[in-house]
Amino acid sequence: MEARRAGTVSNDSPLPFQIRGTSSTLLALKVIDPCDPAFFIHLANTLALAPGFYRNAPIILDLAAVARKNPVDLTIFCAQLRELTLTPVGIQGATADWERNALAAGLAVFPAGRSADPVSVHGRAAPLPRPSTARLVTEPVRSGQQVYAAESDLIVTAPVSRGAELLADGNIHVYGPLRGRALAGTNGDRSARIFCRHFDADLISIAGYYEVNEHMEPHLFGKPVQIRLDNERLIFEPL
Amino acid sequence: MAKVIVVTSGKGGVGKTTTSAAIATGLALRGFKTVIIDFDVGLRNVDLIMGCERRVVFDFINVINGDAKLHQALIKDKRVETLSILATSQTRDKDALTEEGVERIIAELAPLFDYIVCDSPAGIERGAHLAMYFADEAIVVANAEVSSVRDADRMIGLLTSKSRRAEQGQPMPQHLLLTRYDAERVERGEMLKVEDVQEILAVPLLGVVPECPSVLQASNVGMPVVLDDKSPAGKAYLDAVGRILGEETEIVIPRVARRGFIDRLLGRTA
Ligand SMILES: Nc1ncnc2c1ncn2[C@@H]1O[C@H](COP(=O)(O)OP(=O)(O)OP(=O)(O)O)[C@@H](O)[C@H]1O
Ligand SMILES: [Mg+2]
């Protein structure tokens, strides 16, 4: 096939496009064992925690952990990611072998992440700077409703029903009873916390680490509680 | 211009149609020109409970499709002069309802009536959506049990986000009506207490209608239960109608009847 070349055209007409720099935050999926037969089952379960958040999300495959292993077929791998509604856009942290494989799969090669920050399926490549504003919700959040505070804290002064879902890249504060799901630090910020006056949540998650109601300590129910992440453990404390 | 009230619940079988018939009849008994519209296409119900199923010639769907004029489809109640019924089709399904059609008919009814009561089908699909979309006010019917309360909560969320009023940024007044309330089962811990339901749903309580055999008896003879002056359920519905009209009466919460000492001695029943 003959490659297209830069040709000569008259240069009085304006260019029919513009190229600009942008910066957007992308999720990174740190691939640790792509051959694990349960890989996509675990992934689907994690995504199910915040389906609205992950739907069609552009994602970079962080291959640092598998760089020295034989590449898997990224075309097939990405097809499976798309089935889970993720949109893989590129790879980073891998060797030339992987990079050839990635280009063949239509993926871009991103420069390696800056540090060995814990990047995992739970988080984005780099935590965003601490959010400065908060989203305030004063009406009850009902079953089936979802509220997402992008790049900020979320404050809810009304009840959050069972079957309702709160998502925030920052902290979550709930002043009515919290009976639904609360997911803080959804961009991977492990320092995010959840505070509530009347704790009775269906599910709690910080930076992707989660706990469901039936594994929570019943003595905390109905009490003011804060939840934070300590290493890989969620700590529930009375306030 | 009529006020449009939707009676909705999410969950099925909780008492929407019974409530629609009772509230519409109650409003009509107070002298307000009232029409009740059956949105439960395919499951004709309102006309049965209102005792006019044999008088249905044209229905709501016929009017939407332009096969009949509104006045041909409106059935006047024989007991309460100010009450009319717009029955629905038994042979069609919910796809026969169109947003444009519903809007047009509500607009046509509005100058003729004081109240339009919309009996919603169960679920949150098309029929339920169109029943609530044009409402000015909602009665959310729930039973004191977890699944019904959850569905009511979902419905309240939809009313506050997906109704026309909500889309226009206007408030959508909502009332909670607890029906089929069985004090004995509540006492035994098999059903939720009124306070628990209120705490979860956080909308004003319009009334508590007891579970009572008179409801089935009334519906079997095609009579809205408010016309049975001995029915405790009918009484609770009439009180609820008063509250819709702004009367501030105390809500009676059904309690288990306790037999007194003398009664027990004499073996009398309460
Ligand atoms: N207070 C009550 N006491 C006893 N039975 C009742 C009471 N309210 C309703 N019922 C009965 O419950 C059943 C369901 O009532 P109804 O048809 O009004 O519910 P619905 O919510 O309209 O149902 P659907 O979702 O199928 O439309 C009927 O048999 C009715 O007679
Ligand atoms: Mg019904």
Image (tube, coloured by chain):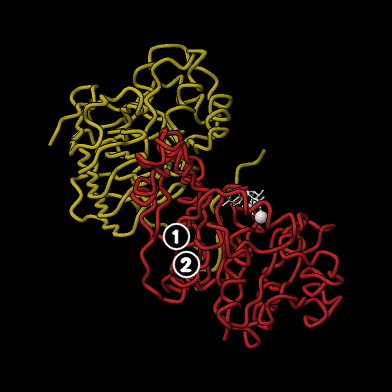
The residue at the point 71 percent across, 75 percent down is: B79
> Ligand 1 closer than 8 Å to the CB at disc 2?
no
Which element is circle 2 on? helix
Name which of mark 2 and mark 1 comes first in the sequence. 1
For chain A, what colour was chosen? yellow
Label 1 chain ID: B
Q: Nearer the viewer, residue B155 or B38?
A: B38
Q: Which residue is mark 1?
A: B207
Three-letter residue code for mark 1 = Gly
Q: Residue B237: horizontal and vertical position, in percent?
A: 52, 63
Q: Nearer the viewer, residue A93 or A119?
A: A119
Three-letter residue code for mark 2 = Asp
The residue at the point 37 percent across, 41 percent down is: B262
Is B165 on the left-hand or right-hand side of A200?
right
Q: Based on the displayed image, in which of its 4 quarters is residue B77 positioned?
A: bottom right
Height in image: A148 above or below B39?
above
> Ligand 1 closer than 8 Å to the CB at disc 1?
no
Kindly check if marks 2 and 1 are in contact, taking CB atoms under 8 A apart as contact: yes
Q: Residue B108: horizontal and vertical position, in percent?
A: 69, 83
Q: Residue B190: horizontal and vertical position, in percent?
A: 45, 34
Is A61 on the left-hand or right-hand side of B66?
left
For chain B, what colour was chosen? red
